[in-house]
Image (cartoon, rainbow, N blue to C red):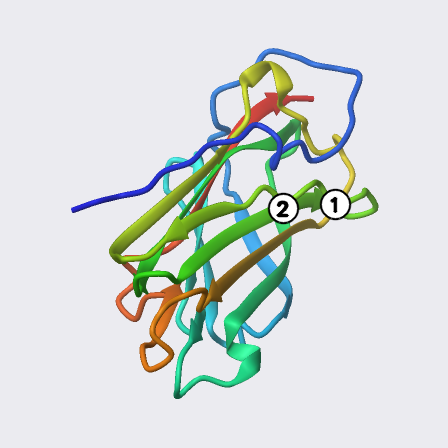
Amino acid sequence: MLTTMAATGLALSLITSGVSAPASPPPSGQITVDVVTVLGSGCPAGTAAVAVAKDNTAFTVTYSNYLAQVGPQSSPTDIRKNCQLALRVHVPQGFTYAIAEADYRGFAALSSGASGMEQANYYFQGTAPTVRVPHKFSGPFQDDWETVDATDVAALVFAPCGVDRLLNVNTELRVSAGSSDPASTSFMAMDSTDGSIHSTYHFEWKQC
């Protein structure tokens, strides 16, 4: 199986902070991630679900209707799909968090000459969105795909201590026909009906 992976340290620079501290082990108390709002053509109401890992190291977002495509049976708006999630992360008192890494997975079927792209950005409520870094795929390609956005430990930026700020996560898929056969269909999906394909966001913890 061919898997494409890319990494960048830019997409997860959430907010500017002049204070840094050593990372801490995950807190033992309960952590919840609630979806406050869901907007976008890639995640109609009821098609995005969030779950927190039992060890408090990450949370996952699973989509069930996130697919961009181009071809004879596609509409012009199908070439781009996006999803904007506003998440409320409840953490135990005395802790704060950063997103150290985000892993995206899906499946793509791109004809020869077609191309696909996944990109995302992240920001806390009240701050400017970060620059989106595109991860590109070229046809012919028919396989699972994976991309990774990662931040060096020294560059991690943490949510403000004691302040309830929403974490906004914006993702996007695009497909272009390019020079592919006009009769062919190409698509790129970030969804799963059985929960096996999802996006994973890895926490880094710090005591306030």
Q: Answer with left or right where residue 125 lies relative to residue 108.
A: right
Quarter of the image with the C terminus in it: top right
User: What amino acid does circle 1 point to?
Assistant: Pro
- Residue sitting at the far left: 1
The residue under label 1 is 129
Residue 46 on image: x %, y %: 50, 76
Residue 193 on image: x %, y %: 30, 71
Q: For residue 58, which quarter of the picture?
A: top left
For marks 1 and 2, the one nearer the N-term is 2
Q: Secondary structure at mark 2?
A: strand
Instruction: From the viewer's side, name the closer residue of 174 and 103.
Output: 174
The residue under label 2 is 121
Instruction: From the viewer's side, name the closer residue of 128 and 180.
Output: 180
- Residue sitting at the far right: 126
Which numbered dot is residue 138? none
How many other residues sit within 10 Å of disc 2, few (<14), some (14-19) or many (≥20)?
many
- Residue depicted at x 61% and y 35%: 12
Q: Is residue 187 above or below residue 54?
A: below
- Residue depicted at x 47% and y 65%: 175
Q: Answer with left or right where residue 119 lies relative to residue 139.
A: right
Residue 155 seen in this snapshot: yes
**Whole-Å distance between the Cαs marked 1 and 2?**
7 Å
Residue 1 on image: x %, y %: 16, 46
Q: For residue 159, which quarter of the picture?
A: top right
User: What amino acid does circle 2 point to?
Assistant: Asn
Residue 185 on image: x %, y %: 34, 76
- Residue depicted at x 58% and y 64%: 83
Give the number of marks. Answer: 2
Q: Is residue 103 above or below residue 83?
A: above
Q: Is residue 135 above or below residue 96?
A: below
In contact (CB < 8 Å): disc 1 and disc 2: yes
